[in-house]
Amino acid sequence: MKHVRSISEIGTEGVVRILRTARHMEAVNSRPVPKVPALVGRTVVSLFFEDSTRTRISFETAARRLSADTVNFSVSTSSLNKGESLRDTIETVSAMGAAVFVVRHRTSGVPWQISEWTDASIVNAGDGWHQHPTQALLDCYTVMARRGLDPSPECLAGLRIAIVGDSRHSRVARSCLEAFSGLGAEVVLVGPATLLPPDTTSWTVSTSTSLDDVLPEVDVVYMLRMQRERMNEALVPDLAEYSRRFGLDETRWSRTRPDTLLMHPGPMNRGVEMMFDPSSTTQSAIIDQVTHGISVRMAVLFELLASGDEVPS
Amino acid sequence: MSLIVRGGRILDANTHTDSGRPADLRVADGLITHVVEPGRELPAADQELDASDCVVTSGFVDLHVHLREPGREESETIETGSRAAAKGGFTAVIAMPNTEPPHDSRIVVDFVREQGRRAGLCEVVPSGCITMDRAGERLAPFAELQAAGVHLFTDDGSGVQDAQLMRRALEYSRDLGVTLAQHCEVVSLTVGAVMHEGSCCSRLGLPGWPALAEELMVHRDIELCRLTGAGMHFLHLSTARSVELVRAAKADGLAITAEVAPHHFSLTDELLSGFDPVFKVNPPLRTPADIAALKEGLADGTIDAIATDHAPHAERLKEQPLDQAPPGMLGLETALGVSLTELVDTGLMTLRQVVAALSWNPARIARLADRHGRPVSVGEPANLTVFDPTARWEVDPSTLASRSRNTPYGGRVLRGRVRHTIYEGVAVVVDGEAIQ
């Protein structure tokens, strides 16, 4: 594959391939010295036009464990603030020999625009409300690992997954629903109608405006972060009302089945969507998600730059 | 200056067959002096143009172009825009008022008209603002601007949001003999919008521009026309429901006219799937169902005119992220080809209907019918377009006359191309090339 910009771009086949490679990477990560020389001499550039320390660190850790060189192009210190265009920036950094750009931008589609101006591979680390494919891949990996499943095109068949919260403005929701349903899971988007996508007919998902109805029936509860700025747009009356309807507290959580998994892409908005401490339940897979993020991002970089090679030991 | 056009078929408002009648014609000093049977002898002329296989018609009139001068000459000038217009077969264009400064004073509209005259490639008719600075607060001086040759008033780029102000504009201008034209968009429904609201925008995670934002204002203005007895022209309609509303208003006898842009009846919102800002336009590209309704509206006369909404933007502006890239696309040089390909080749409309929507209908709406959209007959002003309705050509953005390159049709093959354009008796386009 040339780029990892969206789940639909890599398809189910690409998803399965990355998940399989990620298993090898997990094995690497469990060694005393979790580092292999797979990508020696290759440069991975982080281009974060929007801050996200955790995602950036996760990618940089993944790159370093494969022995790639990492460069962090931080927008606040760059010339974009001096009138340089996006295109100038890409062409300049590209001329320095980047093999992969890891791109985060506040606007949907920027990774596609950028790929017109460079030969480097693009990994989308989040564009607007659109896609965040490595998040979805690590989430699939986490569900599989917790359920003892092997990567295959139908490996999540039979599972019902609720994605709860502001899916309208969420790249995590869009990537996850495409990845989960691509692997055979049944996805339901839960939230007030104002925070659901205006039209869901291009996906195979259902929607619900009642978390309480959905909770007892699902295998995974995937909570989205509720952003405070949505209050200014009158999408919900206030955070307290949102919490009452869509926040998870112990009482609500007790209505789930004993094997239901709790997931969240982080950072959690405690007291808004998360009203109890998820570490109090063994059903929470939230820390696993973070750990698996390294293996999955290693797999993505490996598939882009060294596909077909043996994973070195 | 005199010229002869030989071998064509005349199609004008008086022609009732679709094929036109074969004739040669001679033009001198800005007027048509002879219309004769093919091959008949004509007095000598300075220039002879071959019109074989071509239709000879009254020049096209574009109700809706953005020429960017004054203020944004990086994207277009009145000269480059006029050249694009002439190449597209237009002998008159209505320049939209959203320049910097806007068309709300005599000095600006005089400047625009004068720059058009200097270019000499088509008549550049400035529109006037409905409100000062297009701010939607105070009315612009309609009568003063009318005295400077402005016949069509609009705040295009935005719509007049305040219903009371729009009511006043209609009442105040009702007896002046001008046309008010509305860009229909209720902006509280389109904050941050990049594309049509529907399944495609939901999938792409882009903020949506709902059809309702247009339809609400169409509906409001129809009712304001009913209340005030005034008339109104609707710019660039893009939705199926808008067409229905206008059809019903016309059936009620209201003095409503409407236009559609070629991109709205040929391109859909799915094109944004590649995230190329060239496809960002306001109002946005919509769905196949909307396209079908717009074509039907044109065919049954609900929509009177095809207008390009030619909106040049420099490459660097269109290379920005989608939320920052300005909306708009080129249209002047592709309007005829897109219209014939989409409307005539498909059997939906006759050639004569399409020419009506490009020439005499918009001439009437723009109140230019004394000199544009005239019959092709002796004594009439020689504003003429000669086009080959079957010529196939591929759109190459690099050869366009516009200063900008933001055509959505790059690489497309269109049928129907302008061969010559004659403006005020002068051949300003000969064999597809504009004179310098």
Image (tube, rainbow, N blue to C red):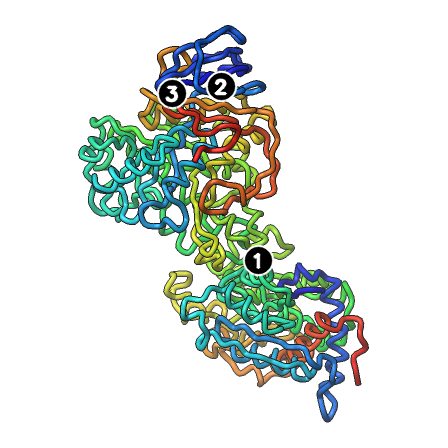
Residue at the image position 39 percent from the left and 32 percent from the top:
B121
Residue A19 coordinates in the image, percent (x, y): 73, 72
Give the vertical position of B421 relative to B402 (above or below): above
- The answer to whether any part of residue A217 appears in the image is no
Cα distance between the residues tagged 3 and 1: 71 Å
Identify the residue position indicated by label 2 in the image. B48
Q: Residues within 10 Å of mark 3 (few under 14, many from 20)?
A: few
Identify the residue position indicated by label 3 in the image. B1
At mark 3, the secondary structure is loop
Identify the residue position indicated by label 1 in the image. A207
Residue B434 coordinates in the image, percent (x, y): 46, 33
Residue B248 sits in quarter: top left
Which amino acid does the dot numbered 2 rest on? Glu
Cα distance between the residues tagged 1 and 2: 69 Å
Side (left or right) of B37 relative to A133: left
| Label annotation for residue A3 | none
